[in-house]
């Protein structure tokens, strides 16, 4: 006979008694698989941690999508304002409102030739 081996018969009474005493895992000889169980537990923890990090990243991505959409709208508005301010009629109107006497040239520019 082997030393330290529990040779108790597995009956309903012994299973019930071991459940109450907390020795059911020893009765079923699950202690042999303890390293495998610990490894699987570690893999489960790693899986939970990585899923949490992925979810946090996805939350950041969704938040940044909203911010990016707002910046696209802001950029389009500023581009429109810039193009609108570049028109000749708008510039003249702004100069008149500012009290400036600068106006568009009446006659075309002369070409100066250097000899």
Image (spheres, grey):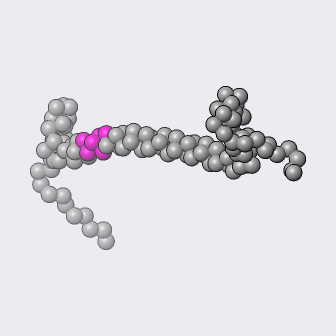
Q: What residue is shown at x 87% (from left), y 51% (from top)?
A: 1
Q: What residue is shown at x 16% (from left), y 32% (from top)?
A: 97
Report if residue 53 is visible in the image: no
Q: Residue 92 vs residue 112: left or right? A: left
Say if 43 sits above or below 26 in the image. below
In the picture, residue 29 is in which quadrant? Answer: top right
Given residues 70 and 12, the one toward you in this image is 12
Image location of residue 38, percent across then percent down: 69, 45
Q: What residue is shown at x 67% (from left), y 28% (from top)?
A: 20
Q: Residue 113 vs residue 1: left or right? A: left
In the picture, residue 63 is in which quadrant? Answer: top left
Considering the whole magenta stretch, tell me its main secondary structure.
helix
**Quadrant location of the C terminus in the rendered image:** bottom left
In the picture, residue 93 is in which quadrant? Answer: top left
Residue 75, magenta (yes or no):
yes
Given residues 31 and 62, the one toward you in this image is 31
Residue farthest to the bottom, as pictured? 115
Q: What residue is shown at x 14% (from left), y 57% (from top)?
A: 108
User: How many badges with numbers are in the image?
Assistant: 0
Given residues 50 and 92, the one toward you in this image is 50
Image location of residue 82, percent across then percent down: 25, 45
Image location of residue 44, percent across then percent down: 59, 45
Report if residue 105 is visible in the image: yes
Q: Residue 82 vs residue 44: left or right? A: left
Image location of residue 51, percent across then percent down: 52, 44
Q: Which residues are magenta?
A: 70-77
Residue farthest to the top, as pictured? 20
Residue 111, magenta (yes or no):
no
Q: Residue 17 vs residue 103: left or right? A: right
């Amino acid at each position: 006979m082997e030393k330290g081996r529990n040779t108790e018969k597995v009956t309903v009474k012994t299973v019930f008694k071991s459940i109450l005493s907390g020795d059911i895992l020893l009765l079923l000889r699950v202690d042999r698989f303890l390293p495998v169980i610990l490894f699987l537990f570690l893999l489960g923890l790693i899986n939970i941690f990585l899923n949490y990090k992925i979810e946090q990243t996805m939350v950041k991505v969704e938040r940044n999508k909203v911010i990016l959409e707002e910046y696209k709208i802001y950029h389009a508005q500023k581009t429109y304002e810039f193009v609108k301010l570049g028109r000749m009629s708008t510039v003249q109107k702004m100069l008149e409102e500012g009290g400036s006497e600068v106006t568009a040239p009446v006659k075309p520019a002369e070409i100066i030739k250097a000899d």
